[in-house]
Image: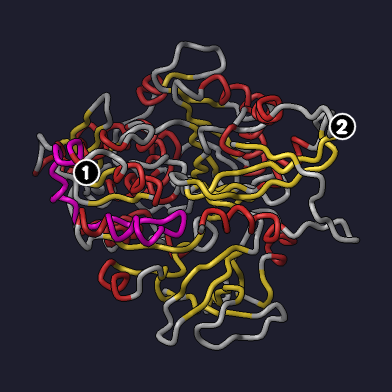
Amino acid sequence: MTLFARPLAASRPQEVALRDERVALTWAEVDEVLNRAANALATMDLGTERRVAVFAENAVETALANLAGLLGSASVIPVNFHLTAEEVAYILNDGGARVLFVGPETADRGIAAAAASGVELVVGWRCPPAPAMRAWEDWLAASTAAEPDATLPPRPNLLYTSGTTGRPKGTDLPPTMFAGGATLAEHLEGLKENPFAEFGTHLVVGPMYHTGPLSGARLLAAGVPSVILGRFDAEKTLAAIHHYRTETSVMVPTHFVRMLALSEEVRSRYDISSMKFVSHTGAKCPIDVKRAMIDWWGPVFMEAYGASEVGTTCGIDSTEWLAHPGSVGMAREPFEALILDDDGNELPANTEGRLYFRDTTGRGIIYHNDPEKTAAAHIAPGVFTLGEIGYMDAEGYVYITDRFSDMIVSGGVNIYPAESEQVLIHHPDVADIACIGVPDPVMGESLKALIIARDPSAPPSEEQLISWCRERLSHYKCPKSVDFVTDLGRNTMGKINKRRLRAPYWQQDAG
């Protein structure tokens, strides 16, 4: 876009601004695509909330569509590319999207979801022609490459998190993660304050429906080149760092585990000394994994603990972490950390309890179109929890020890067992079910189904149950394993204590 790309195109005409494993675009080429896409969106009737959705695997076009939405004064909904057509349709309908962008891997599901939700325009790149879809190149060609209107207001993304009751919840990108500004021109200036913006080329390794990897697209608007990788591969990541001399990235602990699992001979082939700043999020990082990464890459890591609904609530750099191993850091403004007992009383330092945060702005968590869920997320105005148990030392460093919510974090992805439970309880051979998180050496946690069979003498097979679930739900939401049990410990009100069900598995792992 003229506001940032054209000056760069003039001063660095040969520099590659954006590349993936298939194509590389200069600043001038990025400038033209973004101008055309932003102008097309800016002039469209996108409804009062001006929603568009991007449902595609990592690619140059995925980054451009996301950024064009921002520059066209649209609110972008990044949609998990693993979802089924039915799951996507729910998000499109709930979010009020008017346009859907798809790639070749998601086109069929995207077209079906658009038809089911009333989205009239589907734009696809590198897809076979389809009556219900417009080609990306044709859509761009019909728009002007003139300078877009920089006085339009920027609009935050609408993010969807997995649902505790079987349906995802929408939440606007919080102020802590949005550069703000009354106009796009002001917003682009604000993006330059991003801590990544002071460094060179950014490496995108995670799926771009997550806010962290999407920062690569936003950094492009701050003049930072980006290299986008597809589905994560440990050696390809090291090779990209070596070849493109990337300086920053956003990763999750599972990425660290997989890179550390490479042989010393493979690891030694690649020079990773260009990396200067790596933010990691998504799940608590095991102490031995974090220490090994610092030993290998140096003290370049910033751990960010938080959630899509609120952004980073705690943070800790490598130097602090080495002095406080295992901590997720101190609370970051505007948040204050609280350790409470079951009755809501504040506990003294080094005492385990429920971890809560107070948003001093009073905002807390806000769910789209759902004031009841918004209210239920708080125990007092602006006071919320992410479902963890932990303690805080005398200096204010927070340590996570367990979880009291049902949610599990697998490879940095939040999974709510309720979605699988609601599918599996309808299997004709299942009498009762509970899904829990159990230790996984690579993913951190994986989902396990505990099943009471209707006929204990002839239970269904593990393969049958997992297939049943995968036919009806995205694969990543489904159990990876099944154990058959005779009792789930339901109390007289029918409730299950999942901490108690999880305990034997985690005790085995600790032993």
* Magenta run includes residue 280: yes
Tag 2: Cα neighbours inside 10 Å, few (<14), some, or many (≥20)? Answer: few
Residue 20 appears left or right of 130: left
Q: Mark 1, mark 2: which one is toward the viewer?
A: 2
Label 2: which residue?
Answer: 455
Quick check: marks 1 and 2 in contact, CB under 8 Å?
Answer: no
Label 1: which residue?
Answer: 225
Q: Position of residue 59 (x, y in %)?
A: 35, 31
* Magenta run includes residue 430: no
Q: Which mark is residue 195?
A: none
Query: What residue appears at the point 47 percent right and 62 percent down from the top-left corner?
Result: 311
Above-or-below relation of 499 to 461 = below
Question: CA separation, marks 1 and 2?
Answer: 59 Å
Near-viewer residue (291 or 181): 291
Q: Which residues are magenta?
A: 265-292
Q: Secondary structure at mark 2?
A: loop
Above-or-below relation of 509 to 465 = below
Residue 354 appears left or right of 27: right
Q: Position of residue 480 (x, y in %)?
A: 59, 36
Q: Secondary structure at mark 1?
A: loop
Kind of residue at disc 2:
Asp
Above-or-below relation of 376 to 114 = below
Above-or-below relation of 118 to 510 = above
